[in-house]
Image (cartoon, coloured by chain):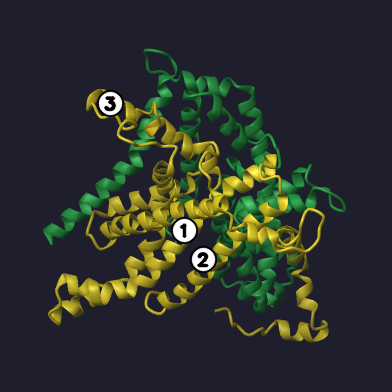
Chain colours: A green, B yellow
Amino acid sequence: MIKRRGWSWFWFFLGALYFLVPLLGTFLFSLRGKRGALSFFAYSRVFADSQFLQTFSFSFKMALLTIVAGIALTLPTMIWVHLRLPKAKPILEACSLLPFVIPPIVLVFGLIRIYSGPPFALASSPLLLVAGYIVLSFPYIYRAIDAGLRSMDLRGLTEAAHSLGAGWGTILFRIVLPNMRVSLLSAVFLTFSIVIGELTLAVMLAWPAFGPYMALMGRDLAYEPAALAILSFLLTWGLIGLIQFASRGITGHSTGLGGTH
Amino acid sequence: MDSIPVCNGKARASRLPAFGPWLGLLPFLLFALAFMLLPCGSILVGSFQDASGHFTFANIAHLGRASILSSFLVTIEVSAVTALGGTVLGFLLAYAITLGKLPKELRSMLLTFSGVASNFAGVPLAFAFIATMGRMGMVTFVLKSVFGINLYEAGFNLYSFWGLCLTYLYFQLPLMVLIITPSLDGARREWREASESLGASAFQYWRHVALPILMPSLLSSMILLFGNAFGAYATAYALTGGLLNLVPILIGAQIQGDVLHDPNLGYALALGMVAVMVLCIVAYQLLQRRSSRWIA
């Protein structure tokens, strides 16, 4: 028994070492922006860069649009399928697997081929970028909403509300949404964390987004990228932390796995 | 799974035409058609067209070129190495926090961290490894100045195959921990007790009971990790700046600057990627069905 637990400690420490050393190393590296002393100089240079704010707020807006449009598209569809059309569920399921089968680089290639010329010249509109982001985040939105719908008696609740004279708007906004707060929150934060630093779609569709900005910084500078990495890690930590905080105490509610790499 | 009979809908359904309920699905179907199916379809069609739009097998045949085959091979190797490494190490880590009797706090710490780390990828991840293991990175620096070990003279290079693998492992390993922990929670203690009471050694328990049961979950997780690395673009782009000849990098270069001078060959490359991913997802689904027989 003792021996077995010794091995557990060994693997745990090895894993912890691998996980923590790059973070610690990056943090220390980011502090060396000024010669001869440790300082937050690189961070202040990042924040002072007007491009940083511009690209970040662009990606922020895209993330908000993706979240709103993605949920507005997915939630009513899934409620409808759940109540009226259970046999269409495999279609949604298949669509949620599609982004795995089509890597972002292939998706954007196809989008450009179709939408760069007439009859649908969308490539210069942020709509295409948002549509692409909805596709990328669809598996996460789908899984989160699915978990939410499973965890409540949607049919019973809607029937009760109907019999009390509620319309579909009331049902959606006063019954379904409040019951799905946690799942929707995790969909929101996951989508945000996917979109905010996304590179592939943004760079190929030539948008001044945060991902391409970071990549550009990495080409020319040394310490600022390290600072950006630390900031991104803190942001990701904050978002995942919010999801886990929101879903605390709910068993079987898994947070999303993996983003776009 | 959701075979709840439609009881309330029946009265309404009889009033609506048979396709009535499908109308509610229309917005989503249109979106899926426009932004999921059409892009795939156009890649498929483009792979079988020449520059002037005539049907040809030439693009597919060109996938057999030595340079393209080698870039598929490198991409598959990176994905396989990091999937295997992630699976083995992730399994050991997950084992340590589930059946390995480590304190409960460590379990929740590792799971929380894995949730973050599996989402921490792309450009910032590449930066973190450059700052740590790059030529001027902290670990490289400390090893050289304190221990006298020069990593780069010893043959290590972050911007090479193994450097990329080391970096990918940072999102592969936590992903594995998150996927496999529930399966290990499902590996019931009674199995171990039953086999021990029948006189099985620890080795026999693993060889004949635990591993056969866990094998489908392990394999399906490995496939998921493989696909995860195979489609990755951002991390490789930011790390190697396109020096390593991965298929996603090649496609990216094709989109941006027409390096192959042949967009149709680009579509064929993309089709090749999708074909590999489809194989993955089919194998994954088959294995999932097997593993759900034992582990709910």
Tag 1 secondary structure = helix
User: On screen, A56 above or below A156?
Assistant: above
- Where residue A183 appears, x then y in whole percent? 55, 58
Kindly identify the residue that appears in the image at 76 percent across and 47 percent down. Answer: A127
Question: From this viewpoint, which residue is outermost toward the front?
Answer: B66
**Numbered marks: total:** 3
Cα distance, mark 3 to mark 1? 34 Å
Camera sees residue A82 = no
CB under 8 Å between callouts 1 and 2?
yes
Q: Which residue is mark 1?
A: B226
Task: Tell which subunit mark 2 falls on.
Answer: B
Which residue is depicted at the point 50% across and 29% down?
A: A225
- Distance from label 1 to label 2 (Cα)? 8 Å
The residue indicated by pointer 3 is B144
Residue B18 at x, y = what percent?
Answer: 79, 83
- CA gap, disc 2 and disc 3: 42 Å
Task: Tell me the element at label 3.
Answer: helix
Q: Position of residue A23 (x, y in %)?
A: 38, 36
Q: Quadrant of the N terminus of chain A?
A: bottom left
Res. B224 visible in picture: yes
Please name the residue that numbered disc 2 is placed on. Answer: B280
Which residue shows up at 63% across the image and 28% down it? A53
Q: Earlier in the sequence, mark 2 or mark 3?
A: 3
* Residue B128 placement: quadrant: top left
Q: Amino acid at mark 3?
A: Lys
Q: Amino acid at mark 2?
A: Cys
Q: Chain of mark 3?
A: B
Answer left or right for B15 relative to A37. right
Work out whether disc 3 and disc 1 sit on a shared chain.
Answer: yes
